[in-house]
Image (cartoon, coloured by chain):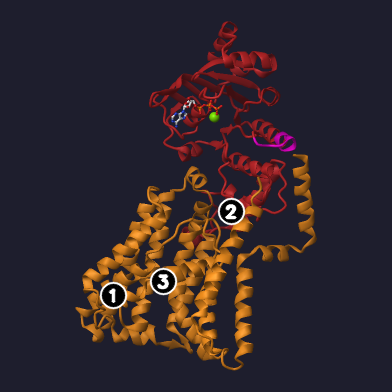
Chain colours: A red, B orange
Amino acid sequence: MASAREPLLTAHGVVKRFGHVQALSGADFTAYPGEVVALIGDNGAGKSTLVNVLSGVLAPDAGEVRLDGAPVRFSGPMDAQRHGVETVYQDLSLAPDLDAAANLYLGREIVRGGLLGRIGVLDRPAMRREAVKAFAELGVELKDVTAAVTTLSGGQRQSVAVARAVAFAHKVIFMDEPTAALGVVQRARVLETVRRVADQGICVVLISHNMPEVLSVADRVEVLRLGRRVASYTAADTTIEELVGAMTGSLDEPNRTGEAEGAR
Amino acid sequence: MTAQSEKAAAAVGGRAAVPDWVRRAATLNELWTFVILVALVLFFTIAAPGKFFTTYDITQIAVNAAIYLVLGVGMTFVIITAGIDLSIGSVLVLAAVAAGEYNIHHGGATSGWGTVAFCVVIALAVGTAWGALQGAVVATGKVPPLIVTLGGLGAALGIAELATGGQDPAGAASTHLQNSLGFGKVLGIPWMVILAAVVTAVFGAVLGGTRFGEHTLAIGSNPTAVRRAGIPVGRQLVKVYGLMGLLAGLGAVMWLASYGTTSIAGHSTDNLKVITAVVLGGTSLFGGRGSVLGTVIGVFIPAVLTTGLIVIGVQQYWQDVAVGVVLVVAVYIDQLRRKTRERA
Ligand SMILES: Nc1ncnc2c1ncn2[C@@H]1O[C@H](COP(=O)(O)OP(=O)(O)OP(=O)(O)O)[C@@H](O)[C@H]1O
Ligand SMILES: [Mg+2]
């Protein structure tokens, strides 16, 4: 069903070496608009490296990345952001001493009009207004948008990082283990957010080691092993056993079909 | 996890009982320092009735504090980036010597307004260039700011001594400069004070209300996040240390105007005094937090102490003891706050 649409983001034969370590050896990746695609794999399979390549943090040694069908080569995370590709880093990448609104707009501050704006005078009321709106859209309630992020709970901080990506992404959001450090309630919140964002037509790429979570929130699952995509499944048609088998390589034979489906 | 969220809910509930502005005011570092400053002023006013709280003393305190205030404004930006600049006294001397040497060769004490203007430009340019250079080295991330500026401290002073043979040259400042900026007043307010107030107001607004200030705070808070947000961290550091240098250059001009000499040997503890003032003002040595308003208060605490102790007839060396103790306490409290604020 999904493969009937045009893919939003594709990677073909991506190679990335770190000295003697080949982190990616011809990895493929496909993502469609409006879907949640989980990227899974054992430790060291190359998930973070692939995401770093796709989000402009790393330049690939070989291979091709296409966004909306056109080949792209991001010169850095900013370049990717200009193309509507945002990343929620595993460490959240927030400035803890600044407030939520300032973090939301870090590097993209709203300035006043006219001459004041030209010299970089901030329009804080506007940023706070927009921040409240952005958080509300994600179902996040912050008691006080002027409180330093360090005073927020882990879940709230996670929400700020997600909101930051959501506010500016119009194509793809990468989330590297966004729920790893969260409690049950906060985890559910973030997953709800992920779903809501995808329903707005944005593609969410979710890295996770939590298989039940993957199956509950993702539409599709792509499996990476030893720097290669070894399988691709529709979440509704697969099981945890199958995913684990593909990740560890114990189900190599049946995976052929999965691989074929993913390449289509 | 549930216990944690309950605790969070309780904390939120507890906070809501206190009026918003009270809660916010109590978290302001400036408020506490300001309370200390007011307490000191009150103490000296009561201890020496009619002697401490005179216009003369206020003016004298302000004039003495003016140069430290200008330096403190720059140091606030530097410390907010989790940096430090030990070189300010030497940079001030180097800028003063550069401007002074030019002045000596263009009329000395009797030089005209054109020379004065050019001397100002030289002092500001030398300071800015030196600061920016140090910033560029800090920006490489290979040498910590403490070492970069410790090296800068020695090198700048060395160059100034080489240029002068270690003696303060005569005729370093024009009488025009001294009679205007140095001793001049407008409506009874010394020009030195007006200049320092303007610098403070302008850069206070820059720190609190502009993109430049926001990025400075963010770098001290989490440089990786800032880099990922596409902000050129290195360039910002060059600008911040360059600003410190610019203000050290301005300090040189103010020094020449006030004292008419370069005082090569007289600035070795400027860095400690200024860093103390900034930290007393609530700016965190760990970066990410601070304000120019706090620094203003931090500059005035030692200044009030000095004058106050003289007025009540106590040896003013007690001031050094008091400031030293207060400084350590201030940093200790900053650490405690940091710990309690940060949640796992
Ligand atoms: N900067 C680097 N320098 C050297 N080797 C690296 C670097 N980054 C990744 N690697 C190597 O590349 C391989 C893939 O790493 P990567 O971080 O992409 O794995 P991952 O799938 O994200 O693993 P995890 O689940 O543990 O996060 C590993 O063998 C790792 O050691
Ligand atoms: Mg990883």
Pointer 2 chain: A
Distance CA(mark 2)–CA(mark 1) = 41 Å
Which quadrant does the N terminus of chain B fall into? top right
Q: Residues within 10 Å of mark 3 (few under 14, many from 20)?
A: many
Q: Which amino acid type is shown beneath numbered disc 2? A: Asp
The residue singled out by tag 3 in the image is B270
Secondary structure mainly formed by the magenta segment: helix
Q: Which numbered circle lies on residue B119?
A: 1
Q: Is residue A63 visible?
A: no
Q: Are marks 2 and 1 on the same chain?
A: no
Mark 1 lies on a secondary structure that is: helix
Q: Residues within 10 Å of mark 2 (few under 14, many from 20)?
A: many
Q: Is residue A34 visible?
A: yes
Q: Is mark 3 within 8 Å of ligand 1?
A: no
Q: Is residue A184 magenta?
A: yes
Question: Residue A168, relative to residue B108: is it above or below?
Answer: above
Distance CA(mark 3)–CA(mark 2) = 29 Å
Q: Which amino acid type is shown beneath numbered disc 3? A: Asp
Where does the magenta region start and end?
A181-188
Q: Earlier in the sequence, mark 3 or mark 1?
A: 1
Mark 3 lies on a secondary structure that is: helix
Question: Residue A127, relative to residue B157: is it above or below?
Answer: above
Q: Which numbered circle lies on residue A97?
A: 2
Q: Which amino acid type is shown beneath numbered disc 1? A: Cys
Pointer 1 chain: B
**Residue B121: percent from the left, percent from the top?**
31, 71
Residue at (76% x, 53% y) in the render: B12
Task: Classify residue B73 as left or right of residue A237.
Answer: left
Residue at (64% x, 33% y) in the render: A180
Of the two numbered discs 3 and 1 in the rendering, the one whose residue sits closer to the viewer: 3
Residue at (64% x, 41% y) in the render: A158
